[in-house]
Amino acid sequence: MQASTALERSATPARELISSQQFAAVAETVMGNNKGMDPGIAEQIVEEALKFVATCATRPEERLRPSRVVDEGWHALILHTATYAELCRRLGQFVHHTPERPDPSRHSSEDLHRTQITIVKAGYEVDQTLWRAPTDQRIPVSAQCEHTPKNCASCFDGGGNGDGKHD
């Protein structure tokens, strides 16, 4: 496969998935939850969360999971309920979030890598700096949950205990 055929389609730029005012408000939420965070980092986090949600919505059969840093942006999006509902409606699928307490022993670098590959196939570039292991604190965030493959419900209905039932 040639590099030019690696992308399935040209995706809408992530920042254009919501209005500039909505984007700024979500970035403000990320900064408010992470005192002292550089505004540029907050914007990167929101943009990557938008890529993740858009990919989940268009590939509901995939078991995708965000990094802890990207999950921070997803949390901020969800807190803006009208923005998030409108985004999911436009994407054609509501992307549910089922959190778990972080546990580095459940971390799978393969799952993060597979998620990144799927995001690229969806037509987006991945910001590698935001997809590090949960123990990597180069970009500290307040998010105290993440997804694991067993309990991932980010792209389909599922439950917090892996049996399809919500806790």
Image (cartoon, grey):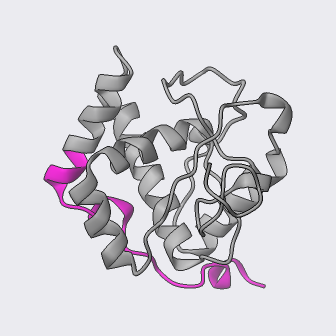
* Above or below, 32 relative to 160: above
- Evaluate whether residue 17 shows in this view: no
Q: Where is residue 122 in the image (x, y as percent from the top left)?
A: 56, 74
Q: From the viewer's perspective, is 32 left or right of 105?
A: left
Give residue 74's position: percent from left, percent from top: 44, 47
Taking the spot 25% from the left edge, 62% from the top edge, the residue there is: 18
The answer to which of 101 and 104 lies nearer the viewer is: 101
Q: Is residue 119 visible?
A: yes
Q: In this view, does 163 lie to the left or right of 59?
A: right
Closer to the camera in the image, 147 or 4: 147
Magenta residues (range) = 1-24
Name which residue lies at 46% across and 68% down: 54
- Front residue of 129/95: it is 95
Name which residue lies at 67% across and 79% down. 6
Compared across the picture, whether 41 is left or right of 127 comes to left
Report the residue at 68% width, 60% height from top: 115
Does residue 75 sit above or below 49 in this rendering? above
> Any magenta on residue 61?
no
- Magenta span contains residue 11: yes
- Residue 26 occupies which quadrant of the picture? top left
Residue 10 higher or lower than 82, as above or below? below
Q: Where is residue 96 in the image (x, y as percent from the top left)?
A: 50, 61
Question: Where in the figure is residue 158, as x and y percent of width and height?
Answer: 65, 63
